[in-house]
Amino acid sequence: MALNDITVYQTEDGFVVEFGGEGEDSIAVTLRSTPELNSDNAVSRAKTLLAAAIEPVHGDGARGKDPALLEEELEEGLEDSFPASDPVSVTSSSIPMRDPNAGR
């Protein structure tokens, strides 16, 4: 969804930031009032909240793993799948096909 406009509404409890998309589609983020929240930083706080919402919930994602462990797993996967990158060998029969109409 491409965002066409961003609108910030102040409410009794804080702010609502609405990200407008194509047509009538939109995403709204409600931010509860805090001492540091204002209309100037509401959009960046809403974007941060949205980014956190789309991150994997589980802690076992690739971003949470040790780089050395990821490298080891990659090497193991490559070794297990070898020689998957080799081209498929194509063979053709050297026996000619018999003419079905021969001998009639």
Image: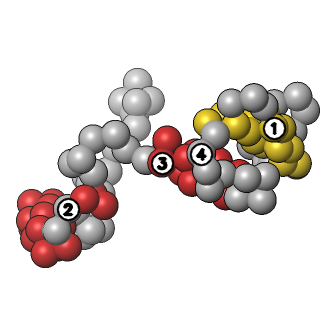
Q: Alpha carbon of mark 4 to alpha carbon of mark 2: how far?
A: 34 Å
Which residue is pictured at 57% across the width and 54% down the height?
A: 48
Label 4 amino acid? Thr
On screen, residue 101 above or below 33: above
Mark 1 or mark 3, earlier in chain: 1
Q: Alpha carbon of mark 1 to alpha carbon of mark 3: how far?
A: 23 Å
Label 3 amino acid? Ala
Q: Residue furthest top?
A: 104
- The answer to whether residue 91 is left or right of residue 31 is left
How packed mark 2 is, by other alpha carbons closer than 10 Å (few <14, some 14-19, many 20 or more), is few
On screen, residue 66 above or below 57: below
Quadrant location, the C terminus: top left
Q: What label does residue 52 carry, if any?
A: 3
The quadrant holding residue 74 is: bottom left
- The answer to whether residue 53 is left or right of residue 5 is left
Instruction: Give 94 or 64, whichever is nearer the viewer.
Output: 64
The residue beneath circle 4 is 34
Label 2 amino acid? Lys
Q: Is residue 16 visible?
A: yes
Mark 4 or mark 2, earlier in chain: 4
Dot 3 lies on which element? helix
How packed mark 3 is, by other alpha carbons closer than 10 Å (few <14, some 14-19, many 20 or more), is few
On screen, residue 79 above or below 56: below
Q: Alpha carbon of mark 2 to alpha carbon of mark 3: how far?
A: 18 Å
Which residue is pictured at 74% across the width and 36% down the height?
A: 16
The residue beneath circle 2 is 65
Contact check, label 1 and label 2, Cβ < 8 Å:
no
Spot occupied by residue 32 in the image (x, y as percentages of width and height): 61, 36
Dot 1 lies on which element? strand
Spot occupied by residue 92 in the image (x, y as percentages of width and height): 29, 57
Instruction: Give 34 or 25, whichever is nearer the viewer.
Output: 34
The quadrant holding residue 30 is: top right
